[in-house]
Image (spheres, rainbow, N blue to C red):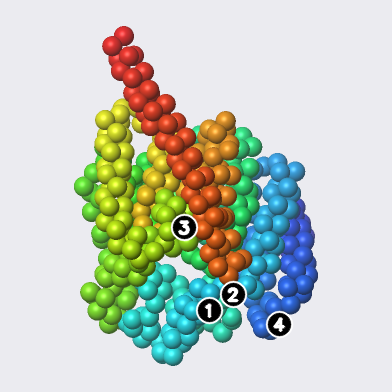
Amino acid sequence: MNVNALINKLINFFKVNLLSIIGILIFGLGETELIKVMQIYSLGRRGKLALLILFLMLFCFVVHWYKTICKETSMKIIFMIILALTIYIRISMFKYMSGDYIDYLKVWIDKMRQYPGVESLGKNIGNYNPPYMYILFIISKFKMHSLYLIKYVSTVFDYLIAIYVFKMISKFTGEKSLLPFISFFAFLCLPTVILNSAMWGQCDSIYASFCLMGLYYTLNNKKYLGIILFSTAFCFKLQSIFILPIILVFIFKGEYNIKHLILFPITFFIELLPDILCGRPLNEVFMIYFNQADYVKILSANSPSLYSLVDNTSSNYEALYLPSLLVAATVMLLFICLIYLFKDALENRKYIEICFVLTLIIPYLLPKMHDRYFYLAEVFALLYVCLNKKKWYILPMTVAASLLAYRNYLFLERESCFALRLGSTMLLIVIVLTFKDVVYDELIYGHSEISKHKRI
């Protein structure tokens, strides 16, 4: 290859990738200044450089994904500017240490660092299911401050959810619509989403991303991949059960059969296998979720659920715990029966609406719920509002209810009962409005319209 040909290739490369290069330079300079402002001295120079590189990688990945979809230069520039801002907001919160990090995550990682190789995987460290503990295990092998790596992982999944929110909305509106673009950034700008990953360092974005991907691929006729992703979500967090009844709905419609369902326990077992192979007892691994459920013995653990409306006393817990489980199970059974009776009115768009109802009702009616357990409901509230624009008020009400609970934990020393009761009332209104819209107006009325057309 002669020199001229090489020069021409380089010129073409820079022409094609000019926007990305400019975006990276702007992002890199801006992020360097931001890290200076943040004064993360504990990272050291290498740590700062590592954090910068990690976020540059995330920025480049998301920009590259968007470039494959959008061909308009102006939209690409707008996308990169807003994307950089969403990342800056998150980085500005990375230094905050929550009680959960100090009392649990940091302690678990420090314990893992005491063991050579993979030996720590065989030990009873932490009360999370193995897949998330694998992530903490990998983090424990790096010298960089574990706080930033934990938050970085959760932040990456923020952007993964945003991508699949974009894809899901595009499925119904088309990629040329502005709505997928708006929904992408709307999700990334939800205050509870930002606080959950970047400030609190929680992992709700991880299991939620697998739930959303499972639904997306099932609706796109990739059912084996869908059930594997649903199973992976369940491996990461027990809270995925809020959406898993949708699998029953897919069975009613013939979307899933026994061949698909058998993959669920197989995937679950495979993802627990590294712990088992490293010597952790089987009963210990399989009892993690049962132990989690038994750990909290109060009706509401700072959650804007139904039980925040009553006093959180031990006597109330003893009196209401079993009846509350019965009420939740009865309501869910009735809802599933209604879906079965009117399954002829179901189509792709209604699956999203059903998921929203599920992720609202289940954590609202169950006892022992925590402040973060409406995370999935917020994801589906956004999807629901994007597909039902006249119902725009549903999203701010759902997010505000969770935000009141976040406020109690992150910004106040003591729990505010008034904030939780206000949040609970808001969610009750959302549930009534959504239930009427999804069940009565769309399922029952939609079924009667289908039946009428069949008679004609």
Q: Earlier in the sequence, mark 4 or mark 1?
A: 4
**Residue type at numbered disc 2:** Met
CA separation, marks 2 and 4?
A: 15 Å
Q: Earlier in the sequence, mark 3 or mark 1?
A: 1
Whether residue 152 is visible to the viewer of this picture, yes or no, is no
Q: Is residue 280 above or below residue 210?
A: below
Front in this rendered view, residue 421 or 392: 421
**Residue type at numbered disc 1:** Ile
Q: Considering the numbered disc 4 on the image, is that residue within a helix, a strand or a loop? A: helix
Q: In the orientation shown, which residue stands out farthest toward the top?
A: 456
CA separation, marks 1 and 2?
A: 7 Å
Circle 4 Cα neighbour tier, 10 Å, few/some/many (<14 / 14–19 / ≥20): few
Q: Position of residue 219 (x, y in %)?
A: 40, 40
Q: Earlier in the sequence, mark 3 or mark 4?
A: 4
Circle 3 Cα neighbour tier, 10 Å, few/some/many (<14 / 14–19 / ≥20): many
Q: Is residue 7 above or below residue 327?
A: below
The quadrant of the image that shows the N terminus is bottom right
Q: Considering the numbered disc 2 on the image, is that residue within a helix, a strand or a loop? A: loop
The dot on residue 97 is 2
Q: At x 29% / y 47%, what residue is drawn?
A: 327
Residue identifier under label 4: 41
Residue identifier under label 3: 303
The dot on residue 102 is 1
**Residue type at numbered disc 3:** Ser
Q: Position of residue 159 (x, y in %)?
A: 57, 56
